Image (spheres, grey):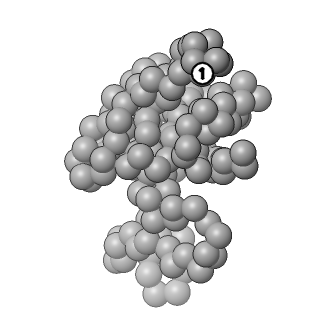
Amino acid sequence: MQSKGTSEWRIEGTRLKNPKSPVKKPVITNPELLHPELSFEIVGSAYDVYNALGPGLKEESYPRARAHCLRKKGIAFREQVYVPSRYDNEVMVKRFADFIVKELIVVELKRGDYYSRPHIKQVVDYLKISTLKLAIIINFGSRQVKFKRIPNLY
């Protein structure tokens, strides 16, 4: 246990928690940040899932738990969303995004400790094809959850 001021802090799983204060949403002051409150909820639910399930599960386990967590929080989403790549009105490639949350953010879940180029390319492609402005890749790693926000620059 480590003390900070007059409150006691403890580490649970991968999160530092203060038992006397509830989790508060951050105050966002950057007006250019896309969907900050929803992003906070999405990432927070990923931490909730990781803290409950822990590391080392198959990649398929995390989306199911994640869907349950989003439902519980009352956040609208679609799962395994078909995102076709078209040319001349013909489908060239069939793709499926893990989640589209509130028709605003693509969320792609991965298992691993780092972001690979193919994973980033995958969500950039989803953003190019769709009209959405933001994607979040969430990695469920062996020691922690990592996330990366990727804006649509196209």
Task: List x then y, in percent, for residue 103.
Answer: 41, 46
Rendered view: 125 above or below 15 = above
Of residues 48 and 54, the one drawn nearer to the viewer in this rendering: 48
Looking at the image, residue 90 sits to the left or right of residue 121; the answer is left
In this view, the residue farthest toward the front is 88
Q: For residue 8, what is the image quadrant?
A: bottom left
Task: List x then y, in percent, for residue 30.
Answer: 63, 76
Of residues 104 and 21, the one drawn nearer to the viewer in this rendering: 104
Rendered view: 110 above or below 69 = above
In the rendered structure, which amino acid carries the disc numbered 1?
Answer: Ser
Of residues 91 and 77, the one drawn nearer to the viewer in this rendering: 91
Let me know if residue 35 appears in the view.
yes
Task: List x then y, in percent, for residue 18.
Answer: 42, 71
Residue shown at 55%/76% (left/top)? 28
Disc 1 element: strand
Q: For residue 68, what is the image quadrant?
A: top left
In this view, the residue farthest toward the bottom is 6
Residue shown at 43%/39% (left/top)? 100
Quadrant in which the C terminus appears? top right
Residue shown at 56%/13% (left/top)? 91
Q: Dot 1: few (<14), some (14–19), or many (≥20) neighbours within 10 Å?
A: some
Let me know if residue 47 appears in the view.
no
Residue shown at 34%/77% (left/top)? 20
Q: Which residue is mark 1?
A: 85
In this view, the residue farthest toward the right is 117
Of residues 106 and 18, the one drawn nearer to the viewer in this rendering: 106
How many numbered badges does the structure rendering display? 1
Task: List x then y, in percent, for residue 116.
Answer: 73, 29
